[in-house]
Image (cartoon, rainbow, N blue to C red):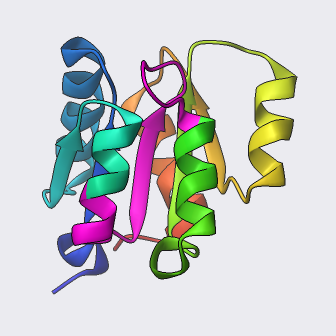
């Protein structure tokens, strides 16, 4: 069994269209084990119950932003080392710099392509063959 068959990913986005695009890209990359959360608070609760080794999160969400989720995950010992990819439509260097303060592993600008998503994930996890 390959690593990508075992990889568990939590996809976090408040819009169904964006969630579908991220999940579709994961499917095309051969990553089938993913679950979704509709905002940062739901994601954090899901990670407390069952941590995933990789979180792919939108930045702009109600209740808790992607950076807020990252910070919460880093402060909670069982999730402090999970991989975290921020997906954002804002090409704002300050968002990325703030994320790096909390251990952001990588980021992806919207709109993205499937090859860009795969490269972003592999930069965090290593090759998924």
Q: Position of residue 69 (x, y in %)?
A: 52, 45
Q: Quadrant of residue 74?
A: bottom right
Q: Residue at x 19, y 24 (%)?
A: 20
In front of the other: 99 or 25: 99
Q: Is residue 64 magenta?
A: yes
**Is 95 located above or below residue 49 in the figure?**
above
Image x and y of residue 21, in percent: 26, 23
* Magenta residue check for 50: yes
Q: Nearer the viewer, residue 9 or 129?
A: 9
> Which residue is found at the position 19% from the left and 32% from the top?
24
Q: Quadrant of residue 93?
A: top right
Residues rendered magenta in the picture:
46-66
From the viewer's perspective, is 104 left or right of 36? right
Rendering coords of residue 91 (x, y %) = 73, 15
Q: Horizontal placement of 86 versus 13: left or right?
A: right
Quarter occupied by the N terminus: bottom left
Query: Is residue 97 visible in the rendered structure shown here?
Result: yes
């Amino acid at each position: 069994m390959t690593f990508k068959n075992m990889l568990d990913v939590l996809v976090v986005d408040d819009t169904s269209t964006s969630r579908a695009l991220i999940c579709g890209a994961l499917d095309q990359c051969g990553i089938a084990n993913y679950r979704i959360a509709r905002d940062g608070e739901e994601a954090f609760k899901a990670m407390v119950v069952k941590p995933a080794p990789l979180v792919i999160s939108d930045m702009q969400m109600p209740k808790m932003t992607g950076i807020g989720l990252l910070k919460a995950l880093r402060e909670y010992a069982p999730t402090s080392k999970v991989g975290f990819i921020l997906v954002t439509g804002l090409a704002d260097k300050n968002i990325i710099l703030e994320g790096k303060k909390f251990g952001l592993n990588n980021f992806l600008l919207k709109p993205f392509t499937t090859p860009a998503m795969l490269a972003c994930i592999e930069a965090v996890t290593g090759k998924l063959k």
